[in-house]
Image (cartoon, helix red, strand yellow):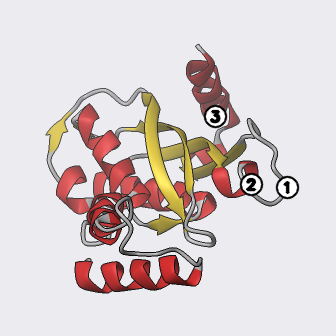
Amino acid sequence: MINREKIEAATTLMLEGMGEDCNREGLVETPKRIAKMYEELFSGMDKTPEKYLSKTFKSEGTEMVVEKDIVFYSMCEHHFMPFYGKVHIAYIPDGKVVGLSKLARTVEVFARRPQIQEQMTGQIADALMEYLAPKGAVVMITAEHLCMTMRGVKKPGSQTVTIARRGEFVQDNQQLEMFFTMVKS
């Protein structure tokens, strides 16, 4: 659970540590604004994907389901700077499917916490396997990390791509190639 008072106190200390006057007009409400913002940005801390992936529908089809270009914003747990991009998800149903919006909501569960892209990719794939029990799942994330583009090496526009494969997507390269083709289209 987010503790607004602690975030406000920490923000005040940080501003003072930077040499700022916390009583100047532009900063007086900043600790409260940051606490409120963190409450929103980290709203996935107390959520689980089960809430979204447990409501399924019977399906005779066993062909791949792809939801691509799911935009997300997250915070790097190493520098607390944003990273953002797109998630592409596919799964091969085994008698049941989930509402398409639930895939995007599952992405939000994991994006809305201090995170690293590599871990988030696997978490989404594992959640699909656990709650949907499909024949296979694959998740690909492409993102820009401000901790790499705004500071440090300063390489704006660079993209990090991660992929997590489960089930048939590990064993069947043809399924994986079909996924890549669908994501490109």
> Answer yes or no: do the residues labelled 3 and 1 have beta carbons within 8 Å?
no
Q: Earlier in the sequence, mark 1 or mark 2?
A: 2
* Residue 96: quarter of image: top left
Horizontally, is 104 left or right of 53 in the view? right
Q: Residue furthest top?
A: 185
Q: Residues within 10 Å of mark 2 (few under 14, many from 20)?
A: some
Q: Amino acid at mark 3?
A: Leu
Query: Where, quadrant-wise, is the N terminus in this rendering?
Result: bottom left
Using the image as rendered, state which of residue 28 and residue 131 is in the foreground: 28
Q: Nearer the viewer, mark 2 or mark 3?
A: 2
Q: Earlier in the sequence, mark 2 or mark 3?
A: 2
Using the image as rendered, state which of residue 127 and residue 70 is in the foreground: 70
Residue 51: image tag: none
Q: Amino acid at mark 1?
A: Val
Q: Earlier in the sequence, mark 3 or mark 1?
A: 1
Residue drawn at (31%, 68%) of the image? 28
Q: Amino acid at mark 2?
A: Met
Q: Which residue is mark 3?
A: 176
Horizontally, is 122 left or right of 5 in the view? right
Q: Residues within 10 Å of mark 3 (few under 14, many from 20)?
A: some
Q: Which residue is mark 2?
A: 148
> Answer yes or no: do the residues labelled 1 and 2 have beta carbons within 8 Å?
yes
Using the image as rendered, state which of residue 175 and residue 119 is in the foreground: 119
